[in-house]
Every structure is written in C-alpha cells, then in structure tokens.
Image (tube, rainbow, N blue to C red):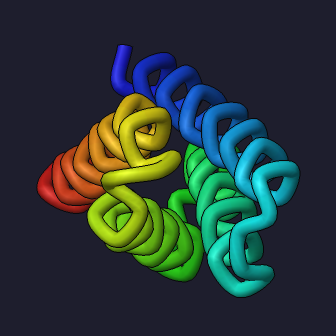
Amino acid sequence: MGRLIEVVAGVVAALVGVVVAAVAAGLGAYAWAVAVIGLSGLGAGIGAYQHIFHHSGPWLTVLWVSALGLLVMTVLTVFSVGIFLRPGTLAAIVTAVTGTWRSGRARAT
C-alpha cells in the first residue's frame, strides 16, 4: 500500500508542478520561478518512481528537495499561482514522508 501511495502522490505532484509551471510561464512569471516549480514537480515524480524500485538514499533526497522546493514556491507565489500549487505540494510532502517511512521500516526488519 505504501508503494501505491508513494507513486500516485508523486505523479500528482509532477503533473501539478508541470502544469502550474506552464501556466506561470504563460502569465509572464520570472524564468527562475517557472524553472523551480517545473523541476521540483518533475523531481518529486521521478524521485518517487525511482525510490519505489531502488530504495536508495539519493532518490529519497531528490524527493525531499523537490517537496521543499514546491513548498517554498507555494509560499512565495501565494498571491498568484501558489494556490494552484497547494495540491502538488501536499502530494510531494506525502510522497516524501511515505518514502521515508517505508525506508525506515525496511531497515528495521
């Protein structure tokens, strides 16, 4: 069940991040903001997918950095596209927490 939660939340985070980055680019947002939003969304999706199959620390780190990047951009863009980033940010954080929980549980057994 943990794998399913991790992959679905990762895909949701990736889709929301990429779509919001495209909308932000269309609205004329700063290029760095569009890049951070898009890369953070993709990082969450790719990190979740890779962590499911490889259980290695670097992918979990990518996942956490991406989740924190989305969280920072949600706060910074709260008055423009930040409201649309909230579902993706929540999904990325759920993915990172689930991945960390699964990794800790696997080490304990």
| Residue furthest bottom as drawn | 32
Q: Is residue 108 visible?
A: yes
Q: Is residue 60 visible?
A: no
Left or right, 21 with respect to 76, comes to right
* Observer-nearest of 2 and 19: 19
Left or right, 74 with respect to 28, comes to left
Q: Is residue 38 above or below residue 53?
A: below
| Residue furthest left as drawn | 108
Residue 46 image point, x, y percent: 72, 54
Q: How many numbered discs?
A: 0
At horizontal 62% and vertical 64% (from top left) the residue drawn is: 37
Q: Quadrant of the N terminus?
A: top left
Q: Is residue 20 above or below residue 91?
A: below
Residue 21 image point, x, y percent: 73, 53
* Observer-nearest of 62 and 13: 13
- Res 100 → quadrant: bottom left
- Res 40 → quadrant: bottom right
Residue 108 image point, x, y percent: 13, 56
At horizontal 48% and vertical 28% (from top left) the residue drawn is: 9
At horizontal 19% and vertical 58% (from top left) the residue drawn is: 104
Q: Is residue 11 above or below residue 39?
A: above
Residue 68 image point, x, y percent: 35, 70
* Observer-nearest of 78 and 97: 78
At horizontal 35% and vertical 25% (from top left) the residue drawn is: 2
